[in-house]
Image (spheres, helix red, strand yellow):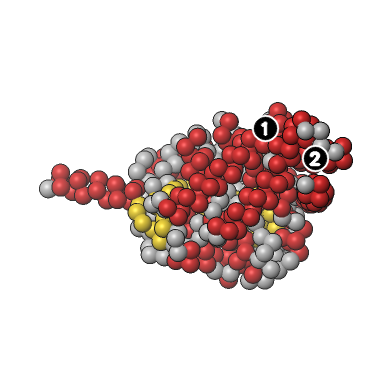
């Protein structure tokens, strides 16, 4: 047990050092400025938005986009077979700004998953020299587009992903969503995302991607990740594997996103992607759970045991040191991204939430109907050939259209 604590504390120290380096290297897009030639003659940028049942979000997003200080834009919204008023809201916004265009999504083709299929249709109609893919539940400050383009140009990159400020309201959101930053900044050396060509050190978030047009099509775009649940991570792998330069940036001063608004959506959303993050390999997921537990959960369990049974002072000191390392990481994250400081003390609870949802993610994929998201269910039991089982929205929409036709006749 004594040797275990030495190893665990050493690992925590290494993780802390990597985390601090990442915090320095994770540049905020607000610190970049477009060269004058881009302001004088701005290239067309296509903002591409897949939208499925987003009537509560889409107007707010479009209002934030038409207020951009970068004016040479086209804003394409693909209605992905929504059964709510998404399309109607976009049509209203079309009348207010000619740069907005509604695209009616086609039925998903065999071999494709939903979001990649929607983004692929958007890209096929986009005319811009740069593509920005952003989610319908995001909001953008007026200089988001210009700052993102500036970060891309000044760093001589072919593609970037910008991490949003995550809005977390409910307890479940705070326990789950906050762990995304914890996982990203402790485990991946960000300097290697930019410096290496291999796809191993890759990451990205689908809430905001920006690519040069020609680069997007050269590495295969969303077609190259058409059967991936985590299309964002795999996009970052594809662009790097194709030999292009790529990096991730901090957009917490410019882009806001509330991923989930209630307990059910948070559990469903995380269950969708946690097992997928390990390529549906149960052993890999189990090893990761064990590793995270050793770093971020076990020291909190061992501390009272060590005190009660009067274990050695050296063991106790190492255990307390490991907890301090964890708290240091959480405090820095909370201060930088303006999260609740008191939630730092709930780190063990957050880890327990993640472990429970990771187990649920495995059970759902392996023993239940499959992976569910936004009315679609995917069979992932054969990872190399993930397939769509059902599409409730499309089927309901088709049924509604048939009923209308019958009524008219």
Q: Nearer the viewer, residue 365 or 194?
A: 365
Q: Determine the secondary structure under disc 2.
A: helix
Label 2 CA crowd tier, 10 Å (few <14, some 14–19, many 20+): many
Residue at left offset 45%, top offset 49% = 364
- Specify which label sits upstream in the sequence, 1 or 2: 2
Residue 193: x %, y % from top left: 72, 60
Which residue corresponds to mark 2?
Answer: 319
Q: Nearer the viewer, residue 218 or 270?
A: 270
- Height in image: 22 above or below 117? above
Residue at left offset 20%, top offset 45% = 404
Report which quarter residue 118 is drawn in.
bottom left
Report which quarter residue 356 is drawn in.
top right
Horizontally, residue 380 falls left or right of residue 198, namely left
- Height in image: 275 above or below 179? below
The residue mark sitting in front, 1 or 2, is 2
Residue at left offset 40%, top offset 51% = 368
Q: Determine the secondary structure under disc 1.
A: helix
Residue 346 numbered mark, or none: 1
């Amino acid at each position: 047990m004594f040797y275990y604590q030495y190893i665990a504390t050493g690992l925590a120290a290494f993780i802390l050092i990597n985390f601090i380096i990442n915090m320095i290297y994770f540049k905020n897009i607000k610190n970049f400025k477009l060269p004058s030639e881009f302001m004088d003659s701005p290239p067309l940028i296509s903002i591409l938005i897949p939208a499925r049942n987003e009537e509560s979000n889409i107007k707010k997003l479009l209002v934030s986009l038409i207020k951009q200080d970068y004016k040479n834009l086209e804003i394409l919204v693909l209605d992905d077979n929504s059964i709510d008023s998404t399309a109607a809201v976009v049509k209203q916004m079309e009348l207010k700004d000619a740069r907005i265009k509604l695209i009616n999504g086609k039925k998903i083709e065999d071999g494709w998953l939903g979001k990649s299929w929607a983004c692929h249709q958007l890209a096929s109609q986009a005319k811009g020299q740069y593509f920005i893919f952003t989610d319908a539940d995001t909001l953008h400050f007026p200089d988001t587009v210009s700052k993102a383009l500036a970060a891309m140009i000044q760093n001589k990159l072919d593609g970037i992903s910008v991490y949003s400020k995550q809005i977390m309201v409910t307890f479940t959101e705070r326990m789950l969503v906050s762990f995304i930053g914890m996982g990203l900044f402790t485990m991946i050396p960000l300097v290697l995302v930019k410096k290496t060509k291999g796809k191993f050190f890759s990451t990205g978030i689908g809430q905001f991607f920006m690519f040069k047009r020609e680069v997007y099509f050269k590495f295969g775009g969303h077609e190259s990740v058409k059967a991936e649940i985590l299309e964002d991570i795999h996009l970052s792998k594809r662009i790097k594997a194709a030999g292009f330069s790529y990096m991730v940036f901090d957009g917490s001063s410019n882009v806001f996103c509330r991923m989930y608004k209630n307990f059910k959506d948070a559990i469903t959303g995380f269950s969708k992607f946690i097992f997928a993050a390990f390529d549906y390999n149960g052993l890999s997921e189990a090893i990761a759970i064990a590793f995270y537990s050793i770093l971020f959960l076990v020291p909190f369990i061992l501390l009272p045991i060590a005190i009660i049974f009067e274990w050695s002072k050296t063991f106790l000191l190492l255990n307390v040191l490991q907890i301090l390392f964890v708290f240091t990481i959480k405090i820095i994250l909370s201060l930088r991204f303006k999260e609740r400081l008191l939630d730092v003390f709930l780190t063990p609870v957050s880890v327990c939430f993640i472990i429970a949802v990771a187990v649920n993610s495995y059970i759902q994929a392996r023993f239940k109907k499959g992976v569910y998201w936004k009315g679609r269910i995917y069979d992932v039991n054969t990872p190399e050939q993930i397939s769509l089982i059902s599409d409730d929205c499309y089927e309901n929409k088709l049924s509604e259209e048939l009923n209308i036709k019958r009524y008219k006749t």
